[in-house]
Image: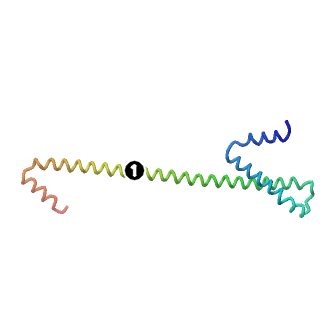
Amino acid sequence: MSETASTIIKLLSALTSPKACIRYIAVAVFIVLSWQYLNELLIELGLPEEQLSIVVLLIGVGIGSLIGQTLTFLGTKIWDSIYKAIQTKKTDKAKVLALAEKQAQEEANNRRLIQRYENSLSHLNWDQKEKLRELTLRER
């Protein structure tokens, strides 16, 4: 197997996650950009041609790795904030539903109490009803 093919196979086996893919793409882009723009700059600075390709390659890999890591870090932070917002919204919705259910239960209990009270009033005589009215009008 040729050296290029084995290098490509090694790179493909290292692509185990989307983060790794983003890093490799960033490295590739910055290697190309460094060959395009840094090559001439380094020649003007007097760097020997034997070392030029290694320096340009290392600069491209270094900058690409940093940019790839930064992109994956920012992507993770954005995803985490979106996930937290979704979870907070779900929690708030659950709280609202629980509160509405509790209020509905209290209203049902109040209606049952009033119904029992109304049913018991029919069994009272006039004096007992009058006493109840007096009790409700007094201050506590």
Is residue 67 rendered to the left or right of residue 40?
left
Q: Answer above or below: position of 11 versus 140.
A: above
Q: Answer above or below: position of 123 versus 42.
A: above
| Percent position of residue 78, x then y | 60, 55
Q: Quadrant of the N terminus?
A: top right
Identify the coloring: rainbow
Q: Quadrant of residue 35?
A: bottom right
Is residue 44 rendered to the left or right of residue 131?
right
| Percent position of residue 64, x then y | 76, 54
Q: Residue visible at 84% across and 60% down?
A: 38
**How many marks can you see?**
1
Is residue 129 rendered to the left or right of residue 63?
left
Q: Nearer the viewer, residue 57 or 127?
A: 57
Furthest-top residue in view? 1
Q: Residue visible at 82% across and 39% down?
A: 5
Is residue 134 rendered to the left or right of residue 41?
left
Q: What residue is pinned by disc 1?
A: 97
SS type, badge 1: helix
Q: Residue visible at 27% across and 48% down?
A: 108
Amino acid type at circle 1 is Leu
Question: Callout 1: few (<14), some (14-19), or many (20+) C-alpha neighbours within 10 Å?
Answer: few
| Percent position of residue 91, x then y | 46, 51
Q: Quadrant of the C terminus?
A: bottom left
| Percent position of residue 15, x then y | 72, 43
